[in-house]
Image (cartoon, rainbow, N blue to C red):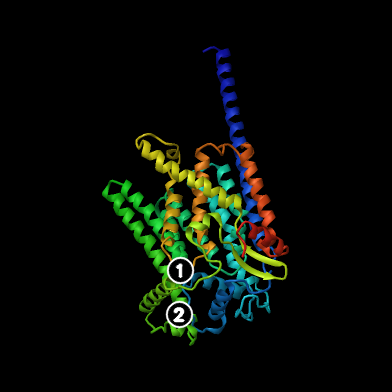
Amino acid sequence: MTLIEKLSVRNRSNTLFLAMTTATQSFREKQNVSVILFHVLICLSLLIRFAYLSYPSQVVFDEVGFGKFVTAYGWTGERFFDIHPPHGKLLITAVAKIGGYHGNIDFANIGNTCTESIAPLRFVPALAGSLIPALVYILLLQLGSSNPAAFFGAVLITFDNAFVVQSRLIGLDMILIFFTLSSLSALLASGTSEGVKKMGWIALSGMTAGLAVGTKFTGLAAVALAMVILLDHFSRNKTLRLRLQDVFHFGVFIGAATGIFLLGWVIHFHLLNLPGSGDAFFVPAGRLIQDTINLNQIMLNANAGIKATHPYSSFWWQWPMMVKPIYYWASGNNGIYLLGNPVLWWGVGGVFTWLMGYLIFGRARNITTEHIADKSPMLWVPIAGYLISIIPLVPVDRPLFLYHYLPSLTFSLLASVLWLDVTGFVRQTTIFKQRIGYYGIIGFCILMFTALMPITYGVSCLSQYQKILGWIKFGP
């Protein structure tokens, strides 16, 4: 090779290296921009949910019950009876203690004025609700979505009014969803890990699933979804060694979930050591396992036996359309409604219906042909999560409310965003190179959130909103 040829090859190599370096730097810059936007979104989520957290300084809706339970755990020690396990309430109690709450608020009636700041009691739901968009973003990436699609999903749930309302009051729903999504994310992370790290992720998944069940019995959906994922992995492994390893993973998950669930009951029985209204339902005999089993059975029976009606109760088939928003609180012309952002609720409802119709009828026409959904091999996970979380509520004949749909809505959001990603609505490039519809939906979502803010935060204009809600048959 002549000197000129050698120089030519070297120049081509240098040009190729320069192009690769430039491309790598460009990719990193784009990723850095995405990371910055993601952190901005999380900061917005925290601000939206924590701003004026002590307002209204009155007892709102279900805070009547949860406030009494927290007071018993942290201050009176008197036994009470509740249809939900103790873990979520114990977390609220612990943080309220640390936050300086003294147990002086009277939770006897809705509308009672708070004699001290109620913010420490609302802190845990607010924090859990603030972190849910981050988990949606992470889960979408774990499930195989592009970064713009993950950001899109996180934006929609950040600016949903129903999630914001539930995050700003003493309650269990945001804690439940946070632990459910955390369990799924940790389990998915274990799939890309090995050795001790893998065991750690599986144990964390089990612990957070146990906390989900310990918050509400509907948290069993987290355990059921994890079992489905682990069984799927087990069925794909053909060798005895890998199958035995999977059985061990099952054991680690169940052991961690059971351990954290029992720990909550240990604390429960320890703190409630004085006679109280709960003695009419159950008095502990001092045998932990037996007391836990007996009390849980009584709780489940009591849950199933609720027959009282409520003006804001609703059926499962009404939830996607938000037919029965809940009137939480009013004072003068200020009021709070549990009403979701139509862009998220109706938009996701439509896309999810489209997805399920495509999967059912598209597969029925030709099972062997490759379909668009095959481009997203993890799409089945949020669909399974949706079905597992919604199906047990379908036959329930006791009063249910709009907030019971929030876990299912979250799973349908995950599935819908993955579907929009593979069908090409979301371009798998950067956030700044998307279709006009991408930005239009985000902008409309923020606009609708802003329009509903007065009845999300309870600041003013209640009568005007009630006229509009009554006109479209959504009002009281």
- Under tag 1, what secondary structure? loop
x, y (%) of residue 455? 67, 62
Residue in view at x 57 percent, y 82 percent: 75
Mark 2, Cα crowd under 10 Å, few <14 / some 14-19 / many 20+, is: some
Horizontal arrangement in the rendering, residue 321 relative to residue 118 (left or right): left
Comparing 342 with 242, the one in front is 342
Disc on res. 94: none
In the image, residue 429 lies at what x, y percent? 58, 36
Q: Quadrant of residue 374?
A: top left
Q: In this figure, what is the number of numbered marks?
A: 2
Who's the residue at 55% across and 84% down the image?
76
Which residue type carries mark 2?
Answer: Phe
* SS at circle 2: helix
| Other residues around mark 1 within 10 Å, as few (<14) / some (14–19) / many (≥20) | some
Estimate the x, y position of residue 319 in percent, counting from the top left: 52, 58
Do the residues bearing badges 2 and 1 touch, measured as CB atoms within 8 Å?
no
- Visible in this render: residue 181? no
Quadrant (top left, top right, bottom left, bottom right) of the C terminus: bottom right
Mark 2 or mark 1: whose residue is earlier in sequence? 2
Number of the front mark, 2 or 1:
1
**Cα distance in 3D space between marks 2 and 1:** 28 Å
The picture quadrant where one finds residue 390 is bottom left
* Disc sitting over residue 398 in the figure: 1
Q: In this rendering, does residue 74 appear at all?
A: yes
The amino acid type found where label 1 is placed reads Arg
User: x and y percent of residue 209 in the render?
Assistant: 44, 62
* Nearer the observer, 164 or 226: 164
- Locate residue 462 relative to residue 103 in the image: left or right: right
Per the image, the residue denoted by label 2 is 269
